[in-house]
Each structure stands twice: as structure tokens, then as C-alpha cells.
Image: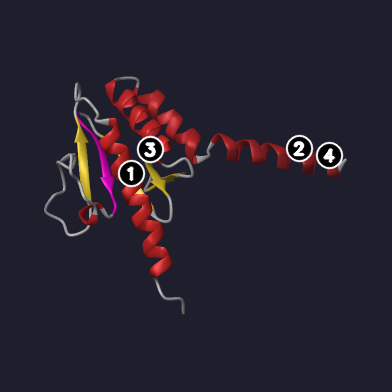
Amino acid sequence: MKKATAAAANAESGAQRAETSPSRLIDARIEELGDWRGETLARLRALIKEAEPDVVEEWKWRGVPVWSRGGIICTGETYKNVVKTTFAKGAALEDPSGLFNSSLEGNTRRAIDFREGDEIDGEAFKALVSAAAARNLTTKKDKPRG
């Protein structure tokens, strides 16, 4: 009887973990927003996954969607009037389309603030995501081990 109870408990805890996986938490955030911010976050998420199919979704800092590959690519924060994607190493990325429009004064990060009604240049955004992932992967390989 104890084995059956333990197995049921393990199955239940596994189900709870699946329900609270980062991807499901991001799904829930998009649904919870239920407005243009949720639609924008969903669109950005889709573009990130198109650009980097091996991206890892994470949930950090008490509720911020994070996409990583070899390190953090970007975050997807939602505020009352803006959906902000902050690129962890954005200052080191080429931005020929001029998407970065926030956090421009820093030495490391750069962000894009999307407001209601803004059009998303999907190709330019995917290029930034791919460049950020490539930088993460290259930087990781170049670091000396020790």
C-alpha cells in the first residue's frame, strides 16, 4: 500500500512541476494579461522560438519570462503601457534596423519597448535574437577553463 501511495505522490508532484514549468508560467502570463500586452508577448515569444528553436524558456525574478541559449538572450517584461524585451548583452550587438529604443545609456543591456499599436519588425527582431544567442555561444567557448 505504501508503494502505491508513494507512486501516486511522485506522479502528483511531477504533474505539479509540469504545471509550473517556465513554459506553462509564460502561457499563463500571456493568458492572464488578456490584452495587447499578452498578444505582443506571445508574438515576441514565437519570433524568439523561430529564430532559435533550441532556446530555453525560464521564469526568473518572481515572474519574468527569460529566453536563454548559452546564457540569457532576453527577457519579456510587461508593464501597464509597454512590453519590454531586454537583451542581456544588447550593447554588444549590431542593431542595423534600430530596434533598440530603451536602456541605451548602459554599457551592457539594451531594450526594446513595444507600445500598443506598434508593429513588430519580425525579421529584424529574429536577427537580434540570433545574434545574441551566437554571441552567448561564442563567448562561452572562448572562456578559459580553470
Q: Are marks 1 and 4 in contact (CB under 8 Å)?
A: no
Q: Which amino acid does label 1 sit on?
A: Val
Rendering coords of residue 2 (x, y %): 85, 44
Q: Which of marks 2 and 1 is in front?
A: 1
- 2 or 97: nearer the viewer: 97
Q: Are marks 2 and 4 in contact (CB under 8 Å)?
A: yes
Secondary structure, mark 2, is: helix
Secondary structure, mark 3, is: helix
Q: Are marks 3 and 4 in contact (CB under 8 Å)?
A: no
Q: Mark 4 points at which residue?
A: 4
For label 2, count other residues whose C-alpha is less than 10 Å away and answer few (under 14), some (14-19) or many (20+): few
- The answer to whether any part of residue 66 appears in the image is yes
Q: Name the residue under label 1.
A: 129
Q: What residue type is labelled 3?
A: Ile
Q: In this view, does 116 lie to the left or right of 23?
A: left
Rendering coords of residue 38 (x, y %): 33, 25
Q: Earlier in the sequence, mark 3 or mark 1?
A: 3
Secondary structure, mark 1, is: helix
Q: Mark 2 points at which residue?
A: 8
Residue at 29 percent across and 31 percent down: it is 122
- 71 or 10: nearer the viewer: 71
Q: Is residue 68 left or right of residue 125?
A: right
Q: What is the quadrant of residue 101 in the picture?
A: top left
Q: What residue type is labelled 2?
A: Ala
Q: Which of marks 3 and 4 is nearer the N terminus?
A: 4
